[in-house]
Image (cartoon, grey):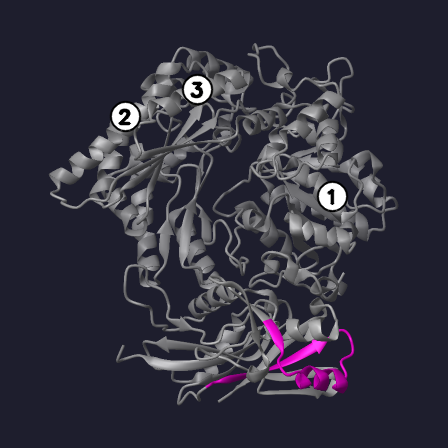
Amino acid sequence: MSNNFSYRIIFSKADTAVYISHLDVMRTFTRAFRRAKTPIYYTEGYTKRPLLVFPYPLSLGIGGEKEILDIKTTVEIPDVNDFMTRLNAVLANGIRVNEIISSEFPPVNYAIYEIISSAIISDVMVNDFLKQDSIQATKFSKKKGDIVFDLKPYIKMIELVPNENIKVILPVGELSNVNVNVFIKAFSDFVGFDSNGFYAKRTGFLP
Amino acid sequence: MNFNDLKKNILSVKSPAKYLGGEYGSIVKDKSKIELRFAFCFPDTYEIGMSHLGLRILYGLINERDKYWCERAFAPAEDFEALLRNEEIKLYGLESYDEIRDFDFIGFTLQYELSYTNILNMLDLAGVPLYAADRTEADPIIIAGGPCCCNPEPLFDFFDFFVIGEGEEVTLEILDLYNEMKLSGTKKLRSEFLNVVGKIDGVYSHKYVANDVNSEAIMCKTDEKIPKKRIISDINRSFYPKETIVPFNEIVHDRAVEEVIRGCIRGCRFCQAGYIYRPYREKDITTIDRQIKSLCDFTGYETVSLSSLSTSDHSRIEELLNTLNKYTESNNIGMSLPSMRIDSFSDELISELMKVRKSGLTFAPEAGTQRLRNVINKNISEDEIFKACESAFTFGINSIKLYFMLGLPTENDEDIIAIAKLSERIIELYYSTLKSKNVAKAKPPQISISASTFIPKPFTPFEFAPQASETEIKHKQELLKNAIKKNRKINVSYNDYRMSFLEAILARGDRKLSKVIYSAWKKGCKFDGWDDHFKWNSWIQSFEENNINPYDYVNREYDKDYRFPWDHLNFFIDKDFLWNEWQKAKCGITTPNCREECSNCGLGRRCDIRKINRSKYVE
């Protein structure tokens, strides 16, 4: 591993690409790297596969503006901007690389989401939602099934931004993680709207 | 339709990406510059349709024309069909989201008889009248091509015309003729076009009417020539896609596919593809090498598959594999070689194979005894099977899959029991091979037997043969099950006999079946080849309602003079030749492969095999 070079790829996932599953995004990048002749590092072992790490995978149906993919290459990439151009030329619609970082990767603990609703959301709704002593939410676990928990302590920030969209900051990562769909379900249940009328995108990350 | 119409409910559907297009390599054009629009419809799921080479070839071919735009549509799964119907969204092209009923052409590929009801369902979802007779100038032209067009009669009433044979050249001839008429402002374009399209070789149109007295005999309404199958002029120069779609989700064959051979020299008597894809043609090594490089470079696929009916028959197979290896190894690309005949396995070839094949090995002996293999002209011997297994075991393979057919002509109980014996001997061979190699801790061997039901298909020597009855098949399945019951290292799987029965009826049927297929679709039949969708009772009812006895199509032996519903279509296979093959089959006499000796099947000068054979020995 000593002679490898690490890069953090910041990409966006929009339009129909929002409906591509995480596994499919992984496959898409694997093939794009091959098309762009990237000297990607392959894992040793019986079945060699490129080492791609998506530290914060997105759920199906959620858009992303600054998604993170960490890769390793066997050769240093001399011109990162040129690499980005070549990669974008061979990526499917809706997936775009916007930045490639080769130095320090900042730590990530929170993610920012913007939630668009087909019905109008008012300040009152958001305030009433937050005023609850505890916010009942349900998350699904493959092992344990539905788990009911209090969402309130996990919401770092919530506000109404222009166009009646909700901006919410939720924890992301190994230590603590809340799926934005859990938030949407809890909020739509509270205000009595159909959760199918909400679309979310992740707009960035915070330390 | 636009994307927002779908957005609200699309997440309720399993793998929504397959209904949204936008894949890498899919072609989106500027609508305002398009003169002709074509919807390529595959009457099965996206995962199956996108694995189909013919779709990729025709999609690339049509889209190579700047002014033509070919889009795709697949049979939606149940959940997505419900969404389309609830939201009143018509079937659309994946590239533009425009409704395909507004296109100039809707073309279906007929790959499998049990997808016929899906065609009706897709036309219905598209909002197009199902019967050709009900369509008007406002409707698109509905056409079909593909292997099942060798007997398109059961679907005759639904299509405006059929394209017989290889599509690479004739498709553009058809579209060019139409476009010429369209641009010249032809009034009643649709009907005028349908009146003249029959002059193109390979087009089978509605000018051929059924004789009322005996609907099996098809008469030509005009003095037009007999529809004959199209054969492309040169496989090395014929269109082959350089840029092809890479789906987001995993499809059945998720890899680059290079066709290396068309046709087959073997003449297995049950195999329809072996006859209707004649003559045998090989691609040159340089062509294959070039096409694979451009495909892999464009797609980024990590595996390439060499496709044909029998890849090891390529006259320069080892040279080919050596050439390809240079490129694939240096680019971390695996090579997949399905359809290898075991009698052609040299040690060198096996070691090539083993480089990429780490899982199991699949053989298709098709029958349990040498006698029956001679009947079906599957000329491989038990020794060859053992030799190939032994090599595989040496390379560390422990699982072998064997394909057999039940209900073959002249089959008896002994032939069935021999299947079990053969499997047991392969297991013994496994242990003795490993013992001689001093392998101490061996994984247990696993033999999987897949026993399907024989289907007598048109344009094969067995077109004269009856299909085994339900009682017979049940007996044979039971017999096989009992013969191997005690061995846990062998497992057997059967297909649903009734499904093979329906497949045989639809493969051999005449025009009367159109109304049966319609009734079955009305009763909710679709995806008939899928166990969880197959509704046998609804089919039986549909036959009854239309006063048709399905058994009439499959349960009897035919004589030489019998007029089959497909007899009027010319596939360049002489009926006399097929009849002689059938007689030889019943006596267990084999026919040499085309490379050893020409058996005068009817292709005549259209076949170049002697030239291919010569080139092999030139060096």
Q: Secondary structure at mark 3?
A: helix
Disc 1: which residue: B123
Q: Residues within 10 Å of mark 1 (few under 14, many from 20)?
A: many
Can you say whether A144 is above or below B261 in the image? Answer: below
**Which residue type does callout 2 highlight?**
Glu
B116 or B110: nearer the viewer:
B116
Left or right: B528 as drawn, with respect to B368 = right
Q: Earlier in the sequence, mark 3 or mark 1?
A: 1
Distance in Å between CA atoms under marks 3 and 1: 40 Å
Mark 3 vs mark 1: give the one in front: 3
Tags 2 and 3 in contact by the CB under 8 Å rule?
no
Q: Earlier in the sequence, mark 2 or mark 1?
A: 1
Distance in Å between CA atoms under marks 2 and 1: 49 Å
In magenta segment, residue A110: yes
Q: Residue B460 at what x, y percent from top left?
A: 51, 23
**Which residue type does callout 1 highlight?**
Leu
Can you say whether B124 is above or below A121 in the image? Answer: above
Q: In the rendered structure, the residue with mark 3 lies on which chain?
A: B
In magenta segment, residue B322: no
Q: Which residues are magenta?
A: A108-137
Disc 3: which residue: B476
Residue B381 appears in view: no
Left or right: B39 as drawn, with respect to B603 = right
Q: In the rendered structure, the residue with mark 2 lies on which chain?
A: B
Disc 2: which residue: B382
**Which residue type does callout 3 highlight?**
Lys
Mark 2 vs mark 3: give the one in front: 3
Q: Are callouts 2 and 3 both on one chain?
A: yes
Disc sitting over residue B473 in the figure? none
Q: Secondary structure at mark 2?
A: helix
Q: Are callouts 3 and 1 both on one chain?
A: yes
Q: Residue furthest front?
A: A133
